[in-house]
Amino acid sequence: MQQPDTPTSMGWGQRLVWAVVAVLGAGAAGAIALHRGESINSIWFIVAAVCIYALGFRFYGAFVAARVLALDATRATPAERLNDGRDYLPTNRWIVFGHHFAAIAGPGPLIGPTLAAQFGYLPGTIWILIGAVLGGCVQDFVILFCSLRRNGRSLGQMARDELGALGGAVALIGVMAIMIILIAVLGLVVVNAMKHSPWATSTVAATLPIAVLIGLYMRSFRPGRVIEGTALGVALLVLSVVAGGWINHHPVLRGWFDYNGPQLALMIIAYGFAAAVLPVWLLLAPRDYLSTFMKIGTIVALAIAIVILQPEVKMPAMTQFVDGTGPIFGGTLFPFVFITVACGAISGFHALISSGTTPKLLGNERDARFIGYGAMAMESFVAIMAMVAATVLDPGVYFAINSPAGVVGAETARAVQTISDWGFPVTVEQMTALAREMGEATLFARTGGAPSLAVGMASIFSQAFGSTLLALWYHFAIMFEALFILTTLDAGTRVARFMLQDMLGNIFPALGRTSWYPSVLICSAMVVAGWGYFLYIGTIDPLGGINSLWPLFGIANQMLAAIALCVATTVIVKSGRLRHAWVTAVPLGWLVVITTAAAWEKLFSPGLRIGFLAHANDLSQKLAAGVLPPGKAAQAPQLIFNDRLDAVLTAFFLVTTWVLVIETVRICHAAVTGRRCPPSAETPYVRTQLAEA
Amino acid sequence: MEIKTPWSRVREVWRRSSRGPVRAAWLFTAAAALWRALRTVTGDDAYERYVAHHRLHHGGKGVPMSRAEYFRAEQRRRWDGIRRCC
């Protein structure tokens, strides 16, 4: 059952169908791009996205599969050759797709587009679509292919094999750094959603005992009954949302769950450490089941709701903040829209999944396009829906929720005045009414993207599914986001711990033993201290923390994508297909341009909300001159130190990216001119014995 | 090795049932296929598949793990690496 892989093998019927898809996609994309008016229907976003992904998969994906990588359905995969019934196991491709998608889908594509909406709906949407089809999907696909042809080796190992020891080391340290920043920024998103909200805090707190209960259920009471356990867990989670509303109205109980940012940060840090040292089956694994099912269920429900309701997008196509004065994060459209969207278009992190577990499960090489390219297209579609949910809000409301008090003013009257003066009218009454509807005390300055996404989702859900229970939908959305943010936080801490143990094991062999409990405690504490520091500083930062942490995360993530594309390009060049190397080299070049530009600005921009060093210098001058109020003066040394630390990290990302790019160019040049370089590590051809091929 | 996709199975049954008068049976079969697909995709039937695999490849030699043992072993194995993304 050879599939038609090249456009020329299509029948007339198929050609007609694809022509219709192309016209529809072009029409919808044109409508989004050229529309200038009060509002635009969100259905255009969905139509444009679906058509563009379908075309990208059918034509560009097929081109990459046939001409660039030359996928060979007769070649035995590692799953077949090394079949051990456990790690290596030929598995149905739909199951592999499910596992792969669940692993790559995280909170990034929900948060990035929400923040990027400050530039208007157009820049973010264009980059999500183009970045995914030409960049992100290709990266995931090619890395999956490279790993498939190398016995399922990891990105770090492939970097070492193809680019030498330096490349391997840079990749490893890059992954550690991105983990630390990622966890800190995600923790901050959760903290900002729970700040002074007894309802949100109690609901999120309830997810812990629920996960433990399900963990016990699936381990001891009914082993391996995943559907039962999950159904029970989801029912309990919904119940916890309702119970949270009851706690919120209880005069005594609500006080138990009412905390400020730094307090919540300390709790998350304590929780993160506990989750990292507890056995996996108790908390991590059951919560992972729950969050995966909640995630997929909620995303599907959101897609259905958007299609039914077809809400109007009220955000303008472009706002004046393309000039860099945006309240949510400082910086001009170029390069910051690319850095901010990050995961929804291209995410370096996916290269770790594509090169780890997934290639060991594929029964047929041909399915690499469906898994690698297809799953990323779906992930990118999630980003489009997040963009819709953020932009269906009144722009004034969107900015009131997402702007930190340090930018628009802590007084509500001043904040609405500032935002209305920008041309996005909003009133204190409107915000108060909205907060009351959502069951919150206030929605002002709830930075991080999660609350505004929850407000958007709540309004879409409550209208589409004929219910007016806005507060329940809002807290359901918050719980859903917190659930998988905390899963990423636990799982990330664990992975970073493994890596740290691995690295330290070279110096102190005892620490390298991953199950030795003192080593587990020490290394977990070090990892948690790393992200905990950035998280805590984020909660006391008057500019909101997101302003500095999210761009740092975006730069780190895009840098990791650049590393992955370096490996991919080297592999393609070594395979003798230099003339097709542009498929990965062009996205690589673009990533290098945007990460360099963004890192440069974060380092040296004179703008106080952009340049880390400018902000540090300004603050230290003010501190020396004694013009800061006492409270701020006490925090200033910490903030100054943090700015300088952020600057060092940014410089480190910049240097490592360039070292790796230069190394890639050198090795590719050597490979083309026939000089000495590490040979391609591709495993030799073995014919498949599986019946299907 | 290759398991048929849920959709192809449903299509097959539909084709066959259209010849006979028992279209109602189709609904039942479709529901059963959906349920099986759900169990497979969620990993609910992982143990059954493991036992089948064990019988096929190691036929007679050794005893397959019990359901609880298998679940624990799988969980340990799965969490020994990068599982989640941003």
Image (cartoon, coloured by chain):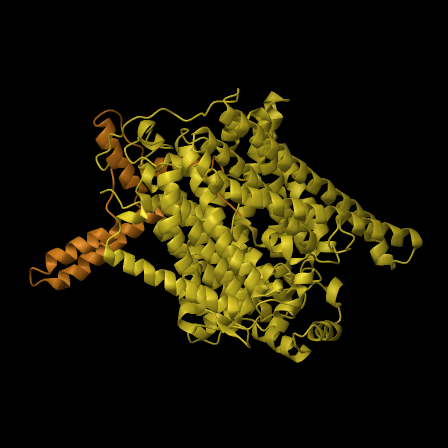
Q: Left or right: where does residue A17 sit relative to residue A184?
A: left
Percent coordinates x, y for residue A42 in the rendering = 47, 69
User: Which quarter of the rendered picture does the C terminus of chain A lie within?
Assistant: top left
User: Which quarter of the rendered picture does the N terminus of chain A lie within?
Assistant: top left
Q: Residue furthest left?
A: B20
Percent coordinates x, y for residue A691 in the rendering = 21, 35
Percent coordinates x, y for residue A187 in the rendering = 61, 51
Between residues A530 and A650, which one lies in front from this camera angle? A650
Q: Left or right: where does residue A302 sit relative to residue B12?
A: right
Q: Residue at x 20, y 51 (%)?
A: B9
Tally the numbered discs.
0
Q: Residue furthest bottom?
A: A429
Q: Residue at x 62, y 33 (%)?
A: A523
- Seen in the picture, residue A423 relative to A485 is either above or below; the reply is below
The yellow chain is A
Q: Left or right: where does residue A108 sit relative to residue B13?
A: right
Percent coordinates x, y for residue A300 in the rendering = 40, 61
- Seen in the picture, residue A86 relative to B84 is either above or below; the reply is above
Q: Is residue A171 visible?
A: yes
Between residues A199 and A435, which one lies in front from this camera angle? A435
Q: Residue at x 27, y 33 (%)?
A: A74
Quarter of image, res A508: top right
The orange chain is B
Q: Left or right: where does residue A82 sit relative to residue B80?
A: left
